[in-house]
Image (cartoon, rainbow, N blue to C red):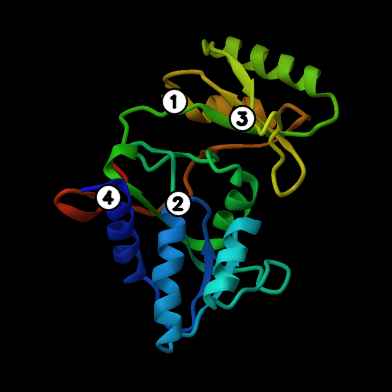
Amino acid sequence: MDARTLKIDAAREALTYVSDGMKLGIGTGSTAEEFVRLLAVRVSQGLSVVGVPTSERTAKLCRELGVPLSTLDDIPHLDLTIDGADEIDPALSLIKGGGGALLREKIVAAASDRMIVIADASKLVDTLGAFPLPIEVNRFGLGATEHAIKNAARDLGLDGPLTLRMTNGEPFATDGGHLIFDASFGRIPDTRAISDALHAIPGVVEHGLFLGLADVAIVADAGGARTVRAAQ
């Protein structure tokens, strides 16, 4: 099965958790976009929902397909967020941000009663970190922030290059106007420790470790979509 088919299978299963009248957080990325396409069909058939998108890219697709949208200013509390992930560990801790929307994704997820992650089974890992950790940073003081991130990581036994994300020869800018370092730490045995250390750095806006936010993951492989819950 090709990757897109697996993403569609996971998105289709996630749609069974959506009921009439829900206020939905809608994620960013290729898997989330498959969910938007399936959701739009249900909306055209009469399903009443309102979505809060996690990026301008997602908002544009929702508008094109007729999915009603709002904002967290008007709807500060959501019933459910459905989003993808770059890595998922057995505790349902995540690395997110490969698509550059990690700050808005985390704000929306935190404003929701539940978060469902949708992915193909290749995103399941024993320990987070093979996928470079996105770290969203303020433009001001970029060099000092980079230095502080490296020192904080080194103190926790993490090493590896920080790479400023680029696109078309220019630094990639998030929807909020920030920049992103991709940190190739490798295995991250203590995700809470590095999360706390990064949050203590003034120039760090947010990072792509999503800890304690996902309730279930729906992952698809050749055998179909299955629901994964956090290991006890």
Say which element carries label 1: loop
Q: Is residue 162 above or below residue 17?
A: above
Instruction: State how far apart marks 1 and 4 are (Cα).
Output: 20 Å
In contact (CB < 8 Å): disc 4 and disc 3: no
Are the residues at dot 3 and dot 1 in contact (C-beta closer than 8 Å)? Answer: no
Q: Residue at x 81, y 32 (%)?
A: 139
Residue bearing the label numbered 1: 129
- Estimate how packed mark 3 is, as few (under 14), some (14 to 19) or many (20 or more) residues with alpha carbons within 10 Å: few
Residue at the image point whose x is 49% and y is 83% from the top? 21
Judge by depth and name the residue closer to the eye, 207 or 163: 163
Q: CA distance from mark 2 to mark 4?
A: 20 Å
Q: Given the current orientation, which residue lies at the most extreme front position?
A: 168
Residue 92 in the figure: left or right of residue 9: right
Q: Residues within 10 Å of mark 2 (few under 14, many from 20)?
A: some
Residue carrying label 3: 196
Q: Residue 181 placed where, x, y %?
A: 64, 27
The mark found on residue 228 in the picture is 4
Label 4 and label 3: CA atoms lie apart by 27 Å
Query: In the image, residue 140 lies at what x, y percent?
Result: 85, 29
- Distance of label 1 from label 2 (alpha carbons): 21 Å
Numbered disc in front, either 2 or 4: 2
Looking at this view, name the residue that lies furthest to the left.
Answer: 223
Q: Which residue is mark 2?
A: 30
How many numbered discs?
4
Q: Amino acid at mark 4?
A: Val
Helix, strand or loop at disc 3? helix
Three-letter residue code for mark 1? Gly
Whichever of callouts 1 and 4 sits on the residue coming sooner in the sequence is 1
- Mark before the other along the chain sequence, 3 or 2: 2
Secondary structure type for disc 2: helix
